[in-house]
Amino acid sequence: MTNYETHEHDVLVIGAGGAGLRAAIEASAQGMNVGLVCKSLLGKAHTVMAEGGVAAALGNVDPEDNWEVHFQDTMNGGKMMNNWRMAQLHAQEAPDRVRELQEWGAVFDRTNKGQILQRAFGGHKYKRLCHVGDRTGLEMIRTLQDQGIHRGFAVYMECSITKLIKDGDKVSGAFGYYREDGRYVLFKAKAIVLATGGVGKAFTVTSNSWEYTADGQGLAYDAGADLIDMEFVQFHPTGMVWPPGVRGILVTEGVRGEGGILRNKDGYRFMRDYLPESTKDQFSANDAESERWVNAAIAGVKTKDKRPPELSTRDNVARAIYTEVKEGRGSPHGGVFLDISYQDAARVRKKLPSMYHQFKDLADVDITAGPMEVGPTMHYIMGGIRVDADSQMSRVPGLFAAGECSGGMHGANRLGGNSLSDLIVFGRLAGLGAAEYVKKLGAAPAVPQDQVDAALAEMEEPFQRGGSGSAKNPYDVQKKLNQIMSTYVGIFRNKEDLEIGIQKLQELKEDIKNVGTKGSKTYNPGWHMCRDLKNMMIASEAIALSALSREESRGAHSRTDFEQLNPELGKFNTAVSKDADGMKLEKTPCPVMPEDLKRLFAKKETTHNG
Amino acid sequence: MNETKATTKTTHPHTGMTTRHDAWWLAPLMVATGFTIFIVYATYRAFENNYYEIGAIISPFYSPKIVLDWFPFSPALLILWVPAGFRATCYYYRKAYYRAYFLTPPACGVKVYGNNGYTGERAFPFVLQNLHRYFFYLATLVLLILWYDAFKALIEPTFHLDLVTVIMFINCFLLSGYSFGCHAYRHLAGGGLNCFSKDESTKRRFKVWEFVSKLNEHHMGWAWCSLFSVGFTDFYIRQVCANVFPNPTFF
Amino acid sequence: MAEANLKVFRGEKDSGTFENYKVPIEEGMVVLDAIHYIQQNMDPTIAVRWNCKAAKCGSCSAEVNGKPQLLCKSRMDKFEPGEEITVQPIKTFPHVKDLVADVSWNYEVNKKIVPFTPQPGHNWVVYQEDIERVQEFRKCIECFLCQNVCHVLRDHNRKDGFYGPRFMVRLAGLEMHPVDSANRLKMVKEDAGVGFCNITKCCTEVCPEDIHITDNAIIPLKERVVDEFYDPIAKFFKSVFKAK
Ligand SMILES: Cc1cc2nc3c(=O)[nH]c(=O)nc-3n(C[C@H](O)[C@H](O)[C@H](O)COP(=O)(O)OP(=O)(O)OC[C@H]3O[C@@H](n4cnc5c(N)ncnc54)[C@H](O)[C@@H]3O)c2cc1C
Ligand code: SF4
Ligand code: SF4
Ligand code: FES
Ligand code: FES
């Protein structure tokens, strides 16, 4: 039998993005012996790519801002599908968490009064995003990383977890391998925090990196947790569309926050036409007003003018761009134009340096001189592992989740900047929750050997099938999966497409069973992909089934056969979990908001999604 | 398929080993050539002890002229060590000659010369580079004198402008741009502060630091231009003294 | 369709060969795309480290035609048609496989640096001009290309005495932080070994984030070290001044 090494920790955190690092720091602070595992090197997690900013109602720029408004914006953006308690905790605690980052050495851009500067973002009523140019995620992850390495927890880099181990119903460990040399490793742990991020690699065009293979969702699902709201997949309106090699790479919403204008091929500024009636009054009435708003924002002065229509929520803008392109008014490479070049070049370079370089280096476009071409790209999944709002524990005792892999916080649509704040708020709560759980637990749960052996055997299989003959090439299978998801489970959905998609996914499952690889275990990406496909399949199936079951359009979920929002359906979350004969789907009632918070939402009911 | 066994960690066996395809050796070669020409010329001139003064005009190699009875050699030797030391310890020149003369490294990604005992600027002799700021102080004094020389050439015996004076002014200008873009000065002016906005004095130093930083960005350019100008000024004055070149007067 | 000629180092733990691959060129393609093409169509086992493909994470460092750079940022159209493009792992760190090297040494070094230590009771009013310098250093994406190219580590292998440019950048960012209260100059001089750097600027040349590592981080640190250890006259004046 092949060997594996063993480590023991009180709390094992899987994932070293913002959420995982914050959880590890917290659990350590609670006196736990903590291990932190990540698939790539420390500091390279997806969080590093976040650009625009972290949302927190500090009120440094717009003093009217407070947690209640942030809470309202978040719930409205999420089409009231959010777990209200999570949204509340998030809005209340984000400011403290941001200040804490500052105390740990994060260097945010400043206002001229010497405070943390905040910028406007889609769906946020006030200027709320604390940022560092357009590399906020880098600042955040580096701060947490440099803080973390002095907290004494163990870090296992380039190590992938492939299986959670359970003692009865309690979680008790995790099995995985080191990417570097294929060594197997077993972690015994009293509690496990999943912070593995998203699912983007199931789609063709995405802003996500290779790491986003839905590992957390897959592991938790296999361990018996339920996944909620999986139909809500956010397509970011502005990804790069050209050249092909960079298709999908994100163009930060910060560009629009700084005054970027969207136009179609005829030079027409179309966004105003797509504003839903319900929110129209929050946006400027004409271009002149938009311009005044932008100028005031640049000068750092207050204004009564309203924001430009480009700052509508992401689902809206994405649908608008998709429609413009579909109806033949797109740019040469199938996007629309996003223009910031009318502003002072030096300022653009200063406020959006990485966008400037990204376009200059990768697309030969000087964004200070001409428009960029942009189109929707799969960006974020609102759904995920269902957790308790205060402790972040899933329904599997000892299994916690935070960050993008957990569900509930963002409802049907996430506002920009709410993810980075989500990471630090719920990362901390998960670390805390896990520590409390461990303190109460007493003796460590057992790690049944048969589960370990099974996990190990599963990893050996692709080699047994080998790299040729009947064995499938994992990359080909991934490509097929991508095609299915992008074609049948994309921005706009309908019953027929979804059914075809689900059928095709079932067929593809056979291929996944037969993927094989050759070569050694030393840094063998083909081998890694064989395992990753299983998680992607779980997430894809969950997305497709959930999407089929939600017969309405809500937030990021747009059904062409049910264009209206149905208030009745908004009272239930879609939840999937593992059953003896496959994936089981349930409709579970949303947690009910207490009366004292309900007063913040006096708005009349609407059936319009937008 | 290429079957040659190659190891990436080829502890590159000899100096200059690299997989770079471009003409990486061109830059250090040009630098070495430029420096060598200057050093040979300057040494010759320092010992020449002639053709450096005519009327109110004095060559920058010999100014300020210090005549000591007991010192039998060229007076240039008494002063040239200041600008020479300044440039020898200048951060830019260090970079340039470490690359061009010492081949540590000759170019980026190209194997250095010598394998053992590299101590960089931690040990003698290069630890002395840390004295650069003292040379900066001294060189600034010398620079003031060169400005004085230029003005003197302008007003003596009567107010007039001739070609040599123009050259002297250009030289002073370039030398100033070089000196005040000095890294050590940048540090002393304000770079050493951690908080610029603390009080009025730090705010003033911030302004100076910003200005020095601007000059400093092009320190290499200033270094070469001023090196050329100082050599050329001396050369022209020498030729005028030796009656080879004319010195036309403009007014 | 135009084809590129790639010569990629294949092997494990230092021993291996260069193998040639012909890869069809698409518009705007970068070298990382070419490696991925090989991975997906010719050999799924070829190892390369990457994450963002947008020059943001600093994972894909390698040497292309002998020049250290990010694979996701090196455009194929920079090369002459038909030119042989050599792709190798970074040389300074132990080789793992194909284009992947073991950079863990860097993470060990980082641990030794005294972390940010805010002045107690600071009110956190900090102006943009005070942090602008620090923000330049915070742009670092830890690609370790500077560490790779620095001859002190690369050729002289003085990992025992020199933290390398990346950590000079980090130290400078901490030392210049207006709210930080720790003094790391002794470390900069002794353990971090700033004196090993002979300011030959290769780190600056390769930095994909355009951080002026030598001019803005290392030289100012050297000057601060001079203040503390090599400038008796200034020290004297300062002590007189303080004594008053
Ligand atoms: C281009 C881009 C820009 C964005 N901009 C913003 C923004 O401006 N504001 C905002 O709020 N949000 C933004 N987001 C969203 C936000 O960055 C992410 O949602 C967030 O960073 C996710 O953080 P996380 O901690 O949940 O996961 P990640 O940071 O992705 O970390 C996941 C971790 O899990 C590890 N992992 C995964 N699977 C395994 C496994 N099987 N075994 C071991 N480890 C594993 C990974 O190695 C990694 O360390 C952006 C996203 C992208 C892609
Ligand atoms: S300047 Fe210093 S740190 Fe940078 S590469 Fe050269 S020797 Fe190394
Ligand atoms: S300083 Fe530049 S080259 Fe060095 S690790 Fe950071 S980003 Fe890379
Ligand atoms: S650094 Fe060049 S003169 Fe001081
Ligand atoms: S892949 Fe992130 S820098 Fe190249």
Image: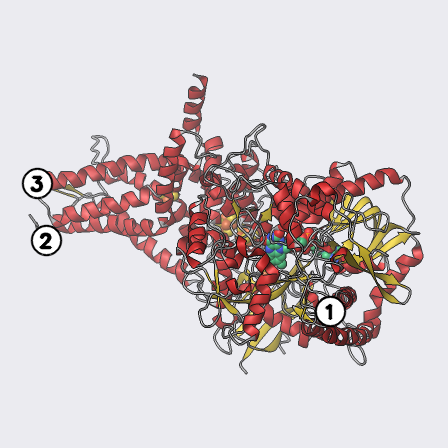
Q: Position of residue A398 (x, y in %)?
A: 84, 47
Please state which amino acid type lies under the numbered disc 2: Pro
Chain of the residue under label 2: B
> Along the horizontal axis of the image, is B195 left or right of A226?
left
Please state which amino acid type lies under the numbered disc 3: Phe
**Residue in the foreground of this view, choosing between B238 and C83:** C83
**Residue in the foreground of this view, choosing between B226 and B198:** B198
Quadrant of the drawing holding the N terminus of chain A? bottom right
| Mark 3 lies within 8 Å of ligand 4 (Cβ measured) | no
Mark 3–mark 2 distance (CA, rounded to whole Å): 19 Å
Task: Give the label on residue A526, or none.
Answer: 1
**Residue in the foreground of this view, choosing between A412 and A248:** A412
Q: Tally the numbered discs.
A: 3
Q: Secondary structure at mark 3?
A: loop
Q: Nearer the viewer, mark 1 or mark 3?
A: 1
What residue is drawn where x is 48% and y is 31%?
A: C228
What residue is drawn where x is 30% and y is 55%?
A: B37
To the question of a shared chain for discs 3 and 2, the answer is yes
Mark 1–mark 3 distance (CA, rounded to whole Å): 83 Å
**Residue in the foreground of this view, choosing between C194 and A110:** A110
Mark 2–mark 1 distance (CA, rounded to whole Å): 78 Å
Query: In the rendered image, which residue does mark 3 sit on?
Result: B159
Q: Position of residue A309 (x, y in %)?
A: 51, 58
The answer to which quarter of the image holds residue A415 is bottom right
> Along the horizontal axis of the image, is A46 left or right of C189?
right
Query: In the rendered image, which residue does mark 2 sit on?
Result: B246
Please state which amino acid type lies under the numbered disc 1: Gly
Chain of the residue under label 1: A
Q: Secondary structure at mark 2?
A: loop
Chain of the residue under label 3: B
- Label 3 or label 2, whichever comes before in sequence order: 3
